[in-house]
Amino acid sequence: MTDNRKTGKALRLLLVSLLCAIAAWLGYAVLGLSLSHVGLGQLVGANLEASGVSHPVTAVLLNFRGYDTLLEMGVLLVALLGVWSLGGMPDYDESSPGPVLDILSRLLIPMLMLVAGYLLWVGAHAPGGAFQAGSVLGAAGVLMMLAGWRLDSRFAGLLLRVVMVSGLGVFVMVSTAMLLIGNGFLEFSPPMAGELILLIEAVATMSIGATLAALFLGSRPAVGPDK
């Protein structure tokens, strides 16, 4: 018993030491940044017209640095696979959500869906986009589950998985199609860049929302016997 306590104490000290070292390294990196560095803002602004959108953040995330967003969606799916690998969805005791939560869910869920649609559409020229809209959709899904709603087992199989991977899949397919017309991977042609970014973000919004709501369940939803 004493040896186990000593081992646990040594591991905690090692973890604290590593965290302190990382914090010190990050602090040194931040303090070492040049105050006179102008960054890439001017370069982004000079190429904003060719990006297909008028908001610099959306242009960077979906065009100039599309690899980052592509990998972020991949990480989200990997996190979901990790949760689903724990097993099937646990049994929940069915109980009434109560009048307050029931009324709030009926009022807020339609509003959350409208807000998600607005954030998706406005992302081309103002703060917004797929991740913001998907997060709002995910919150709507969590609220629905808290109010007692459960996904029908008939739709918890292939259909649910298609929705979850569609965001990453469409992103990869559109980017690969650019190779077939002579562009680079994730290099959108200026005449069609705006439409392609909207397509990617629309599908990604549904995918991100479904994935975040599925993560809230804590494990894989049950599948109907006929699927």
Image (tube, helix red, strand yellow):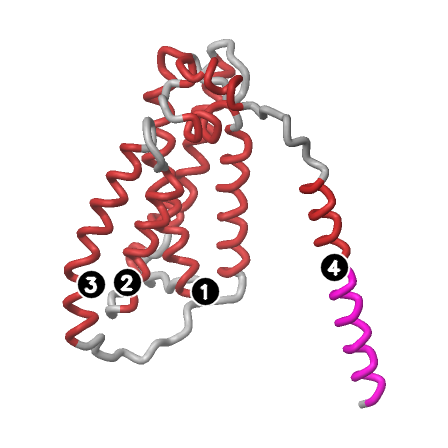
In space, the residues marked 3 and 4 are separated at their CA atoms by 44 Å
Left or right side of 57 for 99? left
In space, the residues marked 2 and 1 are separated at their CA atoms by 17 Å
Q: Earlier in the sequence, mark 2 or mark 4?
A: 4
**Rendered view: 223 above or below 38:** below
Q: Residue at x 28, y 57 (%)?
A: 154
**Rendered view: 194 above or below 105:** above
Q: Position of residue 198 (x, y in %)?
A: 33, 28
Nearest the eye: 23 or 110: 23
Which residue is identified by label 3?
105
Which residue is identified by label 2?
143
In space, the residues marked 4 and 1 are separated at their CA atoms by 34 Å
**Rendered view: 114 above or below 197:** below
Magenta stretch, residue numbers: 2-20
Which residue is identified by label 1?
219
Q: Earlier in the sequence, mark 4 or mark 1?
A: 4
In space, the residues marked 3 and 1 are separated at their CA atoms by 23 Å
Mark 3 touches mark 2? (CB < 8 Å): yes
| Type of amino acid under label 3 | Ser
Q: Nearer the viewer, mark 3 or mark 4?
A: 4
Q: Looking at the magenta stretch, what is its main secondary structure? A: helix
Q: Nearer the viewer, mark 3 or mark 1?
A: 3
